[in-house]
Amino acid sequence: MNPFRPIGKAILGFFESTGRLIVFTLTALSHCVRPPFYLRLHGQQMIDIGYYSLPVVGMTTLFAGMALGLQTYAGFSRFSAEDAIAKVVALGITRELGPVLSGLMVAGRIGAAMAAELGTMRVTEQIDALDTLSTNPHKYLIAPRIIAGLTMLPLLVFVGDIIGIFGGYVVSVYKLGFNPGIYLSETWKVLEFKDVFSGLVKAAAFGFIVTLMGCFHGYNSRGGAQGVGAATTNAVVSASILILVFNYVITELFLKI
Amino acid sequence: MTSPKIKLTNVCKRFGPKVVLDGINLEVAAGESLVIIGGSGSGKSVTLKCILGLLTPDEGTIEIDGEPVIGMKRAERERVNRNIGMLFQGGALFDSLKIWENVAFGLIQGQGKNRVEAKAIAMEKLAAVGLGPEVAELAPAELSGGMQKRVGLARAIATEPEIIFFDEPTTGLDPIMGDVINDLIVKCVRELGATAMSITHDMASARKISDRIAMLYKGKIIWEGQTAEIDNADEAHVDQFIHGRAEGPIQMELRRL
Ligand SMILES: Nc1ncnc2c1ncn2[C@@H]1O[C@H](COP(=O)(O)OP(=O)(O)OP(=O)(O)O)[C@@H](O)[C@H]1O
Ligand SMILES: [Mg+2]
């Protein structure tokens, strides 16, 4: 048995799946911009991703903002904690925690559901049936999902930002007894357009990653219920890792600008 | 001399090391009804999927209306598929859509009919397969297996295509409904002039719906001829199959307990 064989096989397998992902991404994107558009499906996906994820994202950012407020107080209480809490919460939520936590939560909620749904459609031959009915699955199933992810996540994160800052406000005003007026004015003073904007750019990227991974793994799933289960796991894990990687990359890019 | 509607020349298909189709040659004339018989796992469904373009053969050519279809561009393939209807072995109904929307899918997406008009046609087709208006608003999961099969059949014939593929149209139906479906298939072929290619295990059904029968065994067509000739086929495999005997040249791969 040649010891290099499994290594070579793994490397070839990696290149093969990367290649397939690139082709899949390009095909999906090309169908996002070319008619016909299935408006009904676009609307359905946008409601599913944008509206029904609100509670999850709201809860996540609310408690993240509250915890961030408390932590900042614990660390900065020796200095002028009042200013510091407002600043740290506002910047921390809009630049980092809002988009990253929302992205991860949506990966669990939407990415998993997409992979399971498309995977089931694949193994029950529903995707083949679409083909025989002269309907392109990329256009009918995948484009609406990707567009919805790309557009809805920034909206979700924007709402999440507000809720997260509100969480910090609640902790510092009602628990730590700080002045509400000063807190809000400090928040307003420290926030720049670029802070919020970079967070929303991240959100759009994460929305794309989550829906792309959900669709890619679901669409290519093989082999019955077990295959669908594996597709779901792969979709969530790969989306989560890519979110963290791209979070770093985008942060770096914005620091350079 | 008209060219055949469907023509397969030396079609081979392997999955890994496993050879499923090993040089299939088959012709179906326009307006003819061909039935493919053969043991379970002999590659009947794979043959249909190759013709539909869902699987790509490793070798050989397939022509529909004299046009080679392997390696066709996506848009051209969609144009060809617009004239084809397919009943999948497992039904393959879209479970996010209602029953009538399933039947009307090809009319709405493929032919661009409006929903009201398409629904009326869908109701007609449902009635033709023995399903009343009360099932039209249900979801596929609320129907029995046999009912789902009939909906799949209604969907396959809804656009009145020139070529129809039936993968085991009568399995899972009671004998009376099975015969109703047989009549329906005969009617599609005789009245609409469609070309039909069906797969069945049920010899009574095969005799009723076919003009010609072909038998698939070990990846090859081992016998084909007029339906009336099958009883004096003088081919041991065919003989064993149509009489359903355990003893004969076809050895099932099982071991004695
Ligand atoms: N996607 C696939 N990947 C790997 N093997 C496959 C695939 N599809 C079919 N096969 C194999 O090809 C062979 C033929 O399958 P096919 O579905 O055509 O059988 P069939 O003749 O339709 O049988 P049945 O009457 O039971 O439906 C089977 O042995 C199956 O294991
Ligand atoms: Mg089959």
Image (cartoon, coloured by chain):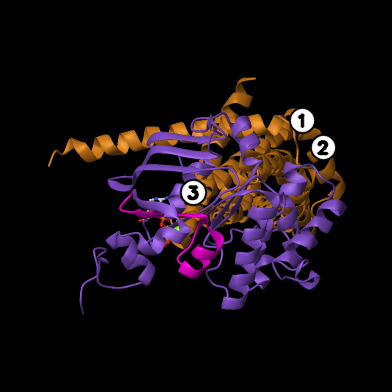
Chain colours: A orange, B purple
In percent of width and height, residue A66 lies at 70, 55
Residue B48 — which label?
3
Check the residue under mark 2 and report the chain it is in: A
Q: Residues within 10 Å of mark 3 (few under 14, many from 20)?
A: many
Q: Quadrant of residue A17?
A: top left
- At horizontal 75% and vertical 70% (from top left) the residue drawn is B135
Secondary structure of the residue carrying tag 1 is loop
For the magenta stretch, what is the residue range? B198-219
Q: Quadrant of residue A230?
A: bottom left
Residue A192 — which label?
1
Query: Relative to residue B18, is residue A7 depicted above or below?
Result: above
Q: For this view, does A83 lie left or right of residue A99?
A: right
Residue closer to the observer: B244 or A252: B244
| Callouts 3 and 2 in the same chain | no
Circle 3 or circle 2, nearest the eye: 3
Circle 3 or circle 1, nearest the eye: 3
- Amino acid type shown at disc 1: Glu
The CA distance from mark 2 to mark 1 is 8 Å
Check the residue under mark 3 and report the chain it is in: B
Secondary structure of the residue carrying tag 2 is helix
Residue closer to the observer: B41 or A11: B41
- Amino acid type shown at disc 2: Trp
